[in-house]
Image: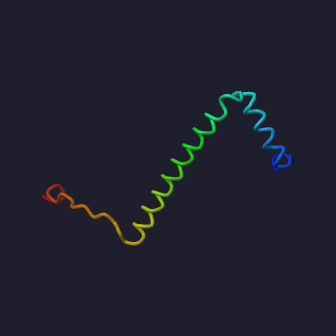
Amino acid sequence: MLLGIPGYVEIGIVILILLLLFGPSKLPQLGSSVGKMLRGFKKEMRSISEDQEASEAGEVDVTPVDSSSSEP
């Protein structure tokens, strides 16, 4: 509950504001782009989570270091 207004009323107010701002013809496009953004965000979060799990499991990528620059 936000400001003492029940959940369904809040959703209705948000939908009404969106209709007034964008109009009914633009809402499907807006919903589609928000959906694409959320899918991309979830994909990146999953990728980060998998990378963290791999590093915690000891599957760290070991790359050779150039030893000529460390000590003369």
**30 to the left or right of 57:** right
Q: Residue at x 17, y 55 (%)?
A: 69
Most foreground residue, 60 or 22 = 22
Task: Indicate the position of residue 46 as horizontal and vertical percent values.
Answer: 49, 58
Residue 71 as seen in the image, left or right of residue 59: left
Image-based side of 34 in relation to 49, left or right: right
Going 46% across and 57% down the picture, which residue do you hit? Answer: 48
The number of callouts visible is 0
Q: Position of residue 12 (x, y in %)?
A: 80, 40
Q: State the residue in front, 15 or 10.
A: 15
**Colouring scheme, one of rainbow, by chain, secondary structure, one colour:** rainbow
Q: Residue extending furthest bottom?
A: 57
Residue under the point 59% across and 39% down: 32
- In the displayed structure, 39 sits above or below 30; it is below
Give the quadrant of residue 55: bottom left
In which quadrant will I find the C terminus? Answer: bottom left
**Residue 37, image x, y percentages:** 55, 43
Which quadrant holds residue 71? bottom left
Residue 23 quadrant: top right
Image coordinates for residue 50, horizontal then vertical, percent: 45, 62
User: Does residue 26 sit above or below 61 in this rendering?
Assistant: above
